[in-house]
Image: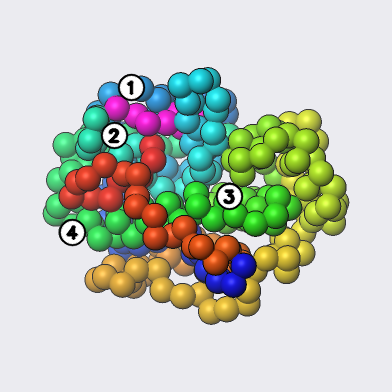
Amino acid sequence: MSEDHSLLLSPLRALVPHEEWAELTRYPNQTYLAGRALLRQGEKGTHVLALLGGLVKVVRTDRDGRQRLLAFRGPGEILGEMALQGVGVRMASVWAISKCKAALVSGEDFRRFVDNHRLAYPLAVMASRRLLEQTEIHDGAVHERLAVALLRLVEVSGGERSFDLTREDLAQHIGVGRKAVSKALERLGQDRVEAGKRRIEVTGVEELREMIVGRAGPGARCGSRHSSSGPAAQNVPALTVKLETRATARTSAPARSPRGRVGFTEE
């Protein structure tokens, strides 16, 4: 385990100027209560969602019925863009963890928006970071992976500390059994996280960070003309997660996204 990687997660809102994100938010808004599906696996991809508020989880059901919780997403994210290319169907479902609000943008309008604002590169950056996120979460000791997942939850939610999640949700996310998550929670201790039957509360962000986070600089968000994203970037917490990974780094693995003009992601 000789190689280090720093992971900085950024939603689309943090990668583009404020006025471009605001353009998306003017589309018709819809509210989703906790537990409702925003997008469903297998459905035709006719639109994307610009998530304006709330927290969601991205879940894929495999052919054998096994569910994998791929990611958590919060305000400022684009959901469902992958289905606008390739086979044209949703590869995963998106479920509301809390009450959510999203702007519904038709596929045609979103493609035009990407072309007009030259957003192919920022979307490709976002896609590559999502791929790295899914790679890193399966590397390291279980308690370290759980700590990374909890810190990312705090980040993408905009600083929330309490989440309507179960041990099974966390197990599906980091790729281990429920018992392994329970043991990892015990190792982290109540000074870092408390877990009820259906609620996870992060009680010690700094204590979690001390376990896995290097105190390096913030790093660059995007190297294009959108690198300066103004007020939008300031509204998104920047958590740099430094996780010691195996020498045989997997970050060079090819992306699973279908080929296309834009680097679409898992939803």
**Is residue 91 shown in magenta?**
yes
x and y, in percent, of residue 147 in the image = 69, 55
Q: Residue 43 got which mark?
A: 1
Q: Are marks 4 and 1 in contact (CB under 8 Å)?
A: no
Q: How many marks?
A: 4
Is 105 positioned to the left or the right of 50 in the image?
Answer: left
Disc 2 is placed on an element classified as: helix
The C terminus is located in which quarter? top left
Mark 4 highlights which residue? 118
Q: Amino acid at mark 4?
A: Arg
Q: Residue 83 got which mark?
A: 2
Q: Which residues are magenta?
A: 89-96
Report how far apart the C-alphas of labels 2 and 3 lie in the structure: 25 Å
Q: Amino acid at mark 1?
A: Glu
Mark 3 highlights which residue? 138
Q: Earlier in the sequence, mark 3 or mark 4?
A: 4
Disc 4 is placed on an element classified as: loop
Q: Residue 207 got which mark?
A: none
Above-or-below relation of 135 to 109:
below
What residue appears at the point 26 percent right and 70 percent down from the top-left corner?
224
Report how far apart the C-alphas of labels 3 and 4 lie in the structure: 33 Å
x and y, in percent, of residue 37 in the image = 47, 25
Residue in front for this viewpoint, 42 or 136: 136
Q: Are marks 1 and 2 in contact (CB under 8 Å)?
A: yes
Q: Earlier in the sequence, mark 3 or mark 1?
A: 1
Q: Residues within 10 Å of mark 2 (few under 14, many from 20)?
A: many
Q: Earlier in the sequence, mark 4 or mark 1?
A: 1
